[in-house]
Image (tube, rainbow, N blue to C red):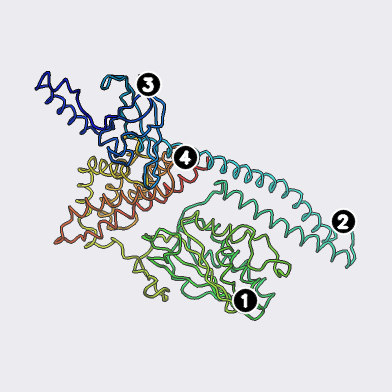
Amino acid sequence: MTDTFTQPTNARSADPGKGDSWNHLRAIIDGLADGIVIVDPRGSIRFANPAAARLFNRTTEGLIGTDLGTPLVAGETTEMEIVRRGGGEVVYAELRVVSTEWEGEQVELVSLRDITDRKLGEERTRQLAHEREARLQAEAASRTKSDFLAIMSHELRTPLNAILGYSELIELGISGEISDTMRDQVGRIRMSAKHLLSLVNDILDLAKVEAGRLRIASAPAKVLEAVTSAITLIHPQASARNLALVVTPEIEGLPPFMGDAERVRQILVNLLSNAVKCTEPGGTITVDGAVLAAPDSAVQLQTRKPHVRITVKDTGSGIPPEKLSAIFEPFVQADSGKRRAREGSGLGLTIAQRLARAMGGDLTVESMVGEGSSFHLWLLADVSAIDGEVASPTTTETISGSRRKLQRPGTLGVLHGLGKVAKVLLVELEPLVDSVVERIRCDSAMRMAAGLRTSQVADHLSTLLADVASALVILEEVDGDASPLLADAMEIQRLVSERHGAQRARLGWTEAAMRREFMIIREEVGLVIRRVVSSAGPLRADDAVAAANRFLDQAEYIGVRTLEKGSDG
């Protein structure tokens, strides 16, 4: 058996120049990127070039004489799975076979091309498609469940309201005089119907939140009004249990929040009601407030934005540490089991947290057994109403009487120069978009972008960045104050962000991928800004970047929310 690539002996003697051509051919074959093997009729390898040896993770000498292990048909292309010697790694090769003559014997010349990357890519594509299909099925099932709950909740409310209405009429004596015993029994019916109606309303709210059908407003609203309204509703319950309700002076100094005032009142009523139930008579429930520029890292917020934090603190029994992470789950209560002292569905905190997150905020808890609990409601602050520095967790956390504000580009010395930044952004818009697109395509966290057209990857980015540049010009001209033009620019950004989120949802983008995309956008925009802002000028590069990021953060928030809704649909 020949174990080297050699020419026939008569070729050397007949024509001395022929030996040089054979050596040249051998050098070409040895230098090929594709593997080349010659297989005899018995299936044994008679020759292998270095590329083939690397494919099998062997030496050429060790490969010669072994069985190829797959049937060969001349003129056909097939694929082969190779388990490499030594670690068991699996690679894939595409085989092309031609018949030829080798040292007087009919053999098969086989070229082997490594297609492992292609096969893995196909497998990833199939896996992503399978995962997307499974997710769509799960989400469809969830929507069906939510639709069923919503329909049933509506159907249950009608007879429950009738029970409440007629029981009140009977209790008032409209249908005739009733005895004290009958009045007591009718009162129990009415209280039970109210409790059941409350549970049905909770289920309906949860179904709407999960189905993405709960309408959430976003407008400036005063914290004090929301707190006062909630306190008014809870005060009779607190008085009945001999509890003190304390609202600290800091609440009056808080800036307005951006959100749905009615939903915030609903959350506060839930928190205060829970506090009343969990606090023993003679205890205290305190409502406190602060405005922070950098909320705690554990809170699911956009950390670059200022937030108002409303805290409801009680002196109750507290929540065990092992149950803290579960109390926001549906149908879970800290006090559970047969000895549960308080009634309820276990949906109140679930709904409250989801409402808070739907408004761009969050709901968190701190508690110690025997010392009480503190629930923190985080809401986006209305930046235009903040006129001083806000506190941060590392310094003072509460404001003292006077209002504080975010360190923002709102003074003449800080804003002067944003127009120049905006002009450069517009001039470099095309290369800026190209850089973002290229980074997205090369990013391992966004493999779904690799096969997309440039227009699909870039999507609405040019429009968004152009509007951000316009907003920077307006921000300088109005000295950071509220302006109809700035409001129009923000509205355009909102529309563009919604369209972008919807397009990403159609392409199968994930929330993590979209957040990664906006991180790349911020980085590329930051590079352009830092290149143009002079260190000697009145405008600091950090301030200019922060001003641009203010708009990009909002675009990310709206885009992600739209993505989540689009994925549900």
Structural distance between the alpha carbons of marks 4 and 2? 68 Å
Mark before the other along the chain sequence, 4 or 3: 3
Badge 1 is on which residue? 317
Dot 4 falls on a residue whose secondary structure is: helix
Mark before the other along the chain sequence, 4 or 1: 4
Structural distance between the alpha carbons of marks 4 and 3? 29 Å
Residue 17 relative to residue 424: left or right: left
Q: Nearer the viewer, residue 251 or 290?
A: 290
Name the outermost residue toward the bottom.
282
Badge 3 is on which residue? 76
Q: Mark 1 or mark 3: which is in front? A: 3
Q: Residue at x 36, y 67 (%)?
A: 405
Callout 4 touching callout 2 (CB < 8 Å): no
Dot 1 falls on a residue whose secondary structure is: loop
Structural distance between the alpha carbons of marks 4 and 1? 49 Å
Point out which mark residue 80 bears: none
Q: Position of residue 520 (x, y in %)?
A: 31, 49
Badge 4 is on which residue? 127
Badge 2 is on which residue? 175
Dot 1 amino acid type? Ser
Structural distance between the alpha carbons of marks 1 and 2? 46 Å
Taking 365 as reference, is 104 above or below it?
above
Structural distance between the alpha carbons of marks 3 and 2? 94 Å
Callout 4 touching callout 1 (CB < 8 Å): no
